[in-house]
Every structure is written in structure tokens, then in C-alpha cells.
Image (cartoon, rainbow, N blue to C red):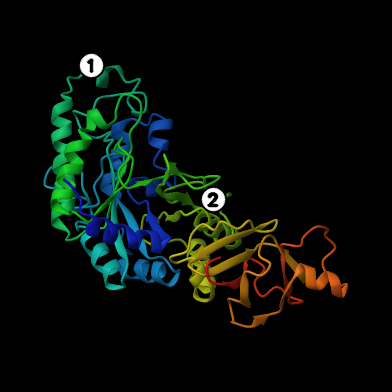
Amino acid sequence: MTISKSIETDRTTWFRNARFGMFIHWGLYSITAKDMWYYSKEEVPREKYEKLFNRFNPIDYNPSQWAELARDAGMKYAVITTKHHDGFCLFDSKLTDFKITNTPYGKDLIKPWIEAFRNVGLKVGFYYSLLDWHHQHYTIDSLHPQRNDEEAKSGKREWSQYVSYLHGQLRELLTNYGKIDILWSDFSYEGKGAKEWESEEIIRMTREINPEILINNRLGLPEDFTTPEQYIPEDVIKDGDKTRMWESCMTIGQSWGYYRQDPENKSTTQLIRMLVDTVSKDGNLLLNVGPTPRGRIQDEFVTNLQEIGQWMSKNGESIYGAGISKFIPPTDARYTQKQEMLYLHLFHCQQGWLALPELAGKVKYATLLGDGTNLKIEDYTALSRAGTAPGIKDREKDLCVLMPAHMPDPRDTVVSLCLRPNV
């Protein structure tokens, strides 16, 4: 389907402006407090793993609380796992019995989730695994938990039947829950790619149902945006001469699913700086939470998100709609920029005059973004003549900003620099 220029602009603008979203990995594996991949890595027998189905009963599930937490953290959209690699569906699919409505919980989880997140003004997206270790016709490969199970491997499998199932479930998701803003498919790899999934047909169907939807690159085709996982690229991502939209999906700890007492949980400072680093390279951050088996987001993550929200309430202007700048920041700092506003993110304590390369004569005024207080600025040459310039030679093109004695926010103090016209 051909997309008109006006639709193209409308459907991508919100994503570029949003910059920050919530990823939610949730399913049977949360009961084990292990990541979904343990099923494959440990080659857990299918009958053992799928016994979890009879125990999944998230009685504390309150999607409105999740939605309010995401909104208050400053997130603008959210993506939830409707089905992961194990094949278990959080939605009421008519094509399988391996679904939430047949567990002790007995209700569709996705419909109330959609309603809750829409009600607080967030965009919504569906993660959907192209892999399915439950389906009888999904062919066994090197990632499959039954890869060394000779009896399972000897069974007859018709790939075309699985593809029909795959397309049918995607049609259900795209038609049964109203408008969806993102289709986040996962993932293509050696032996199973665009040809095997029949990805062109998936994309045609998806755009026929919803022309404005954004589709990630994991169907094995480029589509709308690229998805680095568990890392932030060194620079912007390009496709030839054009800059690609991209989104890093990152965990707070080391696991996608619920992992009690994760030893690698990141601090709020790390998460704020990760967001800033991503935006400074023209990307989005999709930050993951893994709810408990009972349906709660764990306390440590709630605290992280609340603290990020406090920072965003003062500094969100430097994130939403902002992106890369042509200017080079000082050491241990980042720039984000939005039109004539250049935002300096300082990750270290800075007192006295701070030299900013190549900005002499280009800035009208500077303020602390968090509270709006004015900061004194002088070109390096003027300070040099007065004998008060920073102890750095040959900085005639630099602008100097007089920083306060105490950093307002040691996690990331943001200085707002209003650029002169045509800079």
C-alpha cells in the first residue's frame, strides 16, 4: 500500500516527538522469576514449562495503575507483549487454547490495558513474537527448547499452517482492539526471515487495516524504525544519506521478565542519562518493566519511574521533540536541540566558568531549565581580556557560562541556551 506524504508526516511526527515509552514483558515466565529465554537456554521440557499455564492468575492486575505510572514518568507511549516466544497469548485469540482466558484468571488482559493507557493519553503498541514454541507446526530450529528432543523432532510439521496461524493472529490483534499505533514484531534470524514469515503480506494487511500504524524492522524488512536492543548506538542511524528513526529497547535490570532481586538493576541516574544519550542521537528509549505473576510492577521499578518523572517534570522540554545537535558538548555532557533551543545536559559537577566549544556570539541567553534562573554568559575572548577566563588556551570561539556553586541536579543538570537566529 502506498502511503501519502501527509499520512507519512502525521504518523511519524508523534513518535519522533515522544522520545520515551514503556515496554512491558509479561507472561507465564514471570512465575519463575526468570527471563523468557530460560525456556530455550535450559531446554525446559514443554510439558513442564506449560504447567505454569494452570497457575497464571494475576489477581492484582490493575492496568490503570500501570498507565498512570507510565504517564507520570513522562512516557508518551507503551508496548505490551501480546504473545511471546512460548506462544502463550495475553489476549483472547480464537485460534488457540493456549491463552489467558483459559487460565485461572479467565479474562482478556489486553482490552483493559488498551483502555487504561488510552485514557491517560498514551499511544499504544503490540509486541508480537513471530516465534511460537507451542504451535505444533512451528518448525524446530536451533532456538527451539525441543531442539534435542528426538521424539518432538520426528513429528510432521507443516510450515504453511503455522504461517496461516501467524497471519490470523495478527489480524485479530489489528482488528479487535481499535486503533493500534505500533506493531512491534519480534524477530527474524537465520532460517526464519521475511520470506518465511511472508512479511510483505503481513505489512500489506497491517497497512490496509491501519494506514497510520508504525512497524518496526524485525519482520526482516526495514519498515519504519530500527530497534537496537540492550545498547545505545554510538551515533545516529542512517539509511544511505537519510537518518533512520530508531528506538533502543532497554531493561532496568538484566532481565526482560520479572526477576526478583536482580543484581544489575540500574539506578535512576543511569536511566535518566541513558534517555538523554538516546535523544542526543535522535533516538527513542523504550524502557522495560516485567510485572510480577500477581500483576504488579515491582517497587524498585516504581521508584525509578517516579524519580524519572520528577526529573522530566522540570526538564522534559529538553527531551520531547528534541534531537541531535551539530554542536559538540564538553566532556561528560550531552546536547539535545529543538529549533533555536539548545540544551546542555551536564553529568558531572561543574562550578565557575564552563567553556562551550564553537558557541561564541551564537547564544542570546542561558538559563537553568529546571527553575528558569538566568546564567551569566560571556565570550571567551572577553573573559580573557579581563583575566577571568577558564584556564584553557586557544578558545576564542567558545562561549563561557557561569555555573552556580551547587549543581541543581547531580543526575543531570540541564542548561537551556537560546540560539541567535540563523545559527
Give the quadrant of the C terminus: bottom right
Q: Residues within 10 Å of mark 2 (few under 14, many from 20)?
A: some
Amino acid under label 2? Asp
Spot occupied by residue 186 in the image (x, y as percentages of width and height): 32, 41
Spot occupied by residue 108 in the image (x, y as percentages of width and height): 20, 57
Secondary structure at badge 1 equals helix
Quarter where residue 219 is shown: top left
- View extreme (left): residue: 94
Q: Residue at x 79, y 73 (%)?
A: 382
Q: CA distance from mark 1 to mark 2?
A: 39 Å
Q: Which residue is mark 1?
A: 154
Assess whether mark 2 and mark 1 are in contact (beta carbons under 8 angstroms). no
Image position of 247 with respect to 59: above or below: above
Image position of 211 with respect to 190: above or below: below
Image position of 299 with respect to 378: above or below: above
User: Does label 1 or label 2 sit earlier along the sequence?
Assistant: 1
Q: Residue at x 33, y 61 (%)?
A: 13
Image position of 239 with respect to 359: above or below: above
Q: Nearer the viewer, residue 1 or 296?
A: 1
Q: Please state if 232 lies on the left or on the right of 118 as rendered.
A: right
Q: Please state if 285 lies on the left or on the right of 325 as rendered.
A: left
Amino acid under label 1? Ser
Q: Residues within 10 Å of mark 1 (few under 14, many from 20)?
A: few
Q: Work out whether residue 92 can be spotted.
A: no
Spot occupied by residue 259 in the image (x, y as percentages of width and height): 47, 50
Q: Residue at x 53, y 76 (%)?
A: 314
Secondary structure at badge 2 equals loop
Q: Which residue is mark 2?
A: 262
